[in-house]
Amino acid sequence: MPSGRRPNLDKRIADLIGQLRKALVAREQARSESTVAAQMAALVSELQGGHVATAPTPPVTAAPVAVSKRGNRKPRSAASRAAQGAKMKAYWAKRRAAQTKGGQKVGAAKG
């Protein structure tokens, strides 16, 4: 067992519950404020003679976000990856040839 003071798990759980409660209250407050703002905008436009019939906005729900390794990028095909590999091989071959020809690194600062 590691030396030192043992953590107070009850306090840690209580802190996590408090954080969760605050997050839930903040989310509900934001949802209600957006609903009230939409209703007020509809009332103001109706009072100004706009007669805009707007449907009530549905409550905003936070959908679980799937985490992927690639982020927002779309998947690449095997042919696309092969073409990119060929381009990179040509790039590095050209770079090595220039480096051996000139005797110094390409892009290195001179001075």
Image (cartoon, helix red, strand yellow):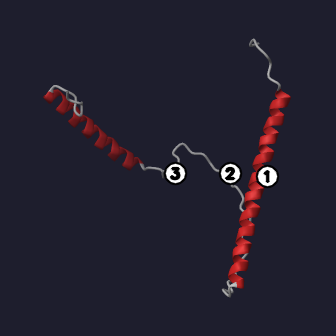
> Can see residue 100?
yes
Residue 71 spot, x, y in % from top left: 53, 47
Indicate the amino acid at tag 2.
Answer: Pro
Q: Quadrant of residue 14?
A: top right
State the residue at coordinates (73%, 73%). 40
Q: Is residue 7 positioned above or below 36 on the image?
A: above
Judge the density around disc 1: few (<14), some (14-19), many (≥20) Cα neighbours within 10 Å: few
Name the residue carrying label 1.
Answer: 25
Quadrant where the C terminus sits is top left
Q: Is residue 1 positioned above or below 22 on the image?
A: above
Of residues 37 and 78, which is closer to you in this image?
Answer: 37
Indicate the amino acid at tag 3.
Answer: Asn
**Given this view, does label 3 or label 1 mark the residue nearer the observer?**
1
Indicate the amino acid at tag 1.
Answer: Val
Residue 1 spot, x, y in % from top left: 76, 13
Q: Earlier in the sequence, mark 3 or mark 1?
A: 1
Q: Is residue 85 positioned above or below 24 on the image?
A: above
Secondary structure found at label 3: loop
Label drawn at residue 72: 3
Secondary structure found at label 2: loop
State the residue at coordinates (23%, 30%). 109
Residue farthest to the right, as pictured: 10
Q: Earlier in the sequence, mark 1 or mark 2?
A: 1
Q: State if disc 2 and disc 1 touch (CB < 8 Å).
A: no
Of residues 97 and 58, which is closer to you in this image?
Answer: 58
State the residue at coordinates (22%, 28%). 105
Judge the density around disc 2: few (<14), some (14-19), many (≥20) Cα neighbours within 10 Å: few
Judge the density around disc 3: few (<14), some (14-19), many (≥20) Cα neighbours within 10 Å: few
Label drawn at residue 64: 2
Label drawn at residue 97: none
State the residue at coordinates (17%, 33%). 98
Q: State if disc 3 and disc 2 touch (CB < 8 Å).
A: no
